[in-house]
Amino acid sequence: MRKLIALTTLLLTTLVATAANKYDNPDTIVVARDGTGEFRTVAEAIEVCRAFMDYHKVIYIKKGTYKEKLVIPQWLQNIELCGEDRDQTVITYDDHANILYAPTGKGMGTFRTYTLKVEANNITLKNLTIENNAARLGQAVALHTEGDRLVFIGCCFLGHQDTVYTGMAGTRLFFKDCYIEGTTDFIFGPSTAWFEGCTIHCKANSYITAASTPKEQAYGYIFSHCTITAADGIDQVYLGRPWRDYGYTLFMNCRLPRQIRPEGWHHWQKEREQTARYLEYQNSGEGADTSKRVSWSRQLNKKEAQQISLQNVFHSTNDWTPVF
């Protein structure tokens, strides 16, 4: 009898625990600043999601400006954050590297400045603007990623220096039809990231990318069918400089404006000319002339370019091709 009672108690406890979170299902959660959704903040909606979900969960975010500093923690997965309208659904914050960080009494540094940090795997963002609207007082990250198999579709990433930080080696990111703007090194880090049909907007005479691709990682940043634009008065833009040895960046079938410097690339430190993997293939526009490119960059041939596919680039210990 005691065993039966104990077993019954255990079953009831399990059922109560299972049913305790009414959001433990694949239904969509709605967030709205005006109170018409289930939550008023994105953080609250993220908080109710179950750890390691094996189903797809959508957090639908209505138009509005959400001043939030967000983390999607590593124990979540299969979440999609979808905005009602890309330009009118804005998640924003304003930390920058030189803000006093109380525990140290010094500036908070680049890596704490994010507006949105994605630690989790299998996360999708659609139709959202992620902004760091700090003044130009230092590095200020809008998007900081650490998870693998992340997809960003039709999103805007706004900031100045260090707008998008792809912060974890070995992780794979896919950006489709996104808009990314910044001043210096505004796409940087060690991840493998494919940018398809994106607009990359330069707000200063500086560097677009700062890849830190590890030596053993075959691919870093690939820009495919992207358009590079520049603000008024800008006329001296580099495609990239290697933040670490072996930085990998490829622009292929992209439109490059006249503001791209003839040499194309900068070494950051002279010795990195020996290791940087800087590549181009069949770009167009006034900035695509390769006759004066640095000698340590390279043009792919047709056979090499044919090997640059989503399947090949994102192949690792587990195959993944983004769905979009």
Image (cartoon, helix red, strand yellow):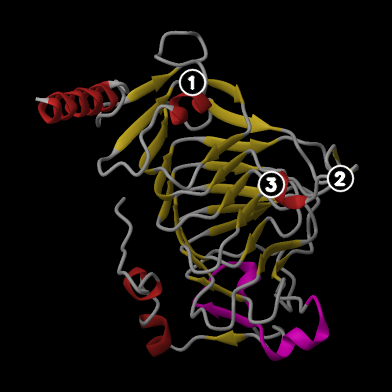
**Quadrant of the rendered structure where residue 185 is?**
bottom right
Q: List the residue tagged with mark 1.
A: 63
The amino acid on which the numbered mark 1 sits, given as a three-letter code, is: Lys
Callout 3 secondary element: loop
- Of the numbered discs 1 and 3, the one sitting upstream in the chain is 1
Q: Looking at the image, can residue 85 be seen?
A: no
133 and 238: which is toward the camera: 133
Quadrant where the image shows the N terminus: top left
The amino acid on which the numbered mark 2 sits, given as a three-letter code, is Thr
User: Could you say which is closer to the camera, residue 307 or residue 199?
Assistant: 307
Tell which of 48 and 125 is nearer to you. 48
In the displayed structure, 145 sits above or below 28; it is below
75 relative to 205, above or below: above
Residue 11 locus on image (x, y percent): 17, 28
Q: Which amino acid, by three-letter code, is at mark 3? A: Val
Spatial CA distance of label 3 from label 2 is 20 Å
Whether 67 is among the magenta residues is no
Q: Is residue 281 left or right of residue 260?
A: left
Q: Which residues are magenta?
A: 268-289
Q: Which residue is mark 2?
A: 104
* Above-or-below relation of 98 to 308: above
**Residue 190 appears at what percent x and percent y?**
59, 67
Q: Residue at x 58, y 30 (%)?
A: 91
Crowding at dot 3, Cα within 10 Å, few <14 / some 14-19 / many 20+, comes out as many
Q: Earlier in the sequence, mark 3 or mark 2?
A: 2
**Residue 77 relative to residue 266: left or right:** left
Name the residue beneath numbered marker 3. Answer: 141
Report crowding for label 2: few under 14, some 14 to 19, many 20 or more residues within 10 A (C-alpha): few
Question: Residues at badges 3 and 2 in contact (C-beta under 8 Å)?
Answer: no
